Amino acid sequence: MENTGLKVLVHASAFFAPFLVPFVLYLVVDDSEIKRLSIQALLFQLVMGALIFISVILIFFLIGIPMIIVFGLMTIIVPIIGIVKSLQGETYNYPIVGRWF
């Protein structure tokens, strides 16, 4: 359970600074696992932001309403799952972006 606090911080940053904290930790920390997790968290937040933006545009066609609900829930639930896995000492890869790095 090395760097558990930093892992939890990366996952929890989705609720207060989704882009800043992973970027800063990527630049500051030398641990490769924290760097990989920071990139995944940053990419996940960017992808979810883009998907929610597209869903807002598609609301005019009524297909965007269920999409906004699903992507909004994913934006909340996925970081919580990551926090729980980090506290248990397990490795967690974000869905959608997975393990690209």
Image (spheres, rainbow, N blue to C red):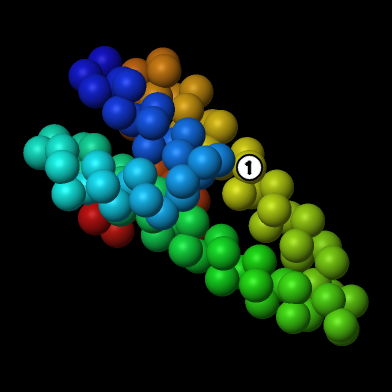
Residue 10 sits above or below residue 52 on the image: above
- Asked whether 24 or 11 is in front, the reply is 24
Q: Is residue 9 left or right of residue 69?
A: left
Return the x and y of residue 29 as percentages of the image width and height. 15, 38
Q: Which residue is mark 1?
A: 76
Can see residue 6?
yes
Rendered location of residue 97, percent (x, y): 42, 58
Which residue is at a point 24% across and 23% down the rendered structure image? Answer: 3
Q: Residues within 10 Å of mark 1 (few under 14, many from 20)?
A: few
Left-right relation of 18 to 50? left
| Placement of 94 over or under 84, stated as above or below | below
Q: Is residue 55 left or right of residue 63?
A: left
Q: Residue furthest left?
A: 30
Residue type of the residue flagged with mark 1 = Ile
Based on the displayed image, in which of its 4 quarters is residue 101 positioned? Answer: bottom left
In the rendered image of this protein, does residue 4 appear above or below residue 58? Answer: above
The answer to which quarter of the image holds residue 6 is top left
Q: Which quadrant of the rendered structure holds the N terminus?
A: top left
Q: Residue at x 80, y 72 (%)?
A: 64
On screen, 36 above or below 5?
Answer: below
Query: Residue at coordinates 33% horizontally, 30% vertically from top-left?
Result: 7
Disc 1 element: helix
Count of number-bearing discs: 1
The residue that appears at 56% across and 61% down in the rendered structure is 48
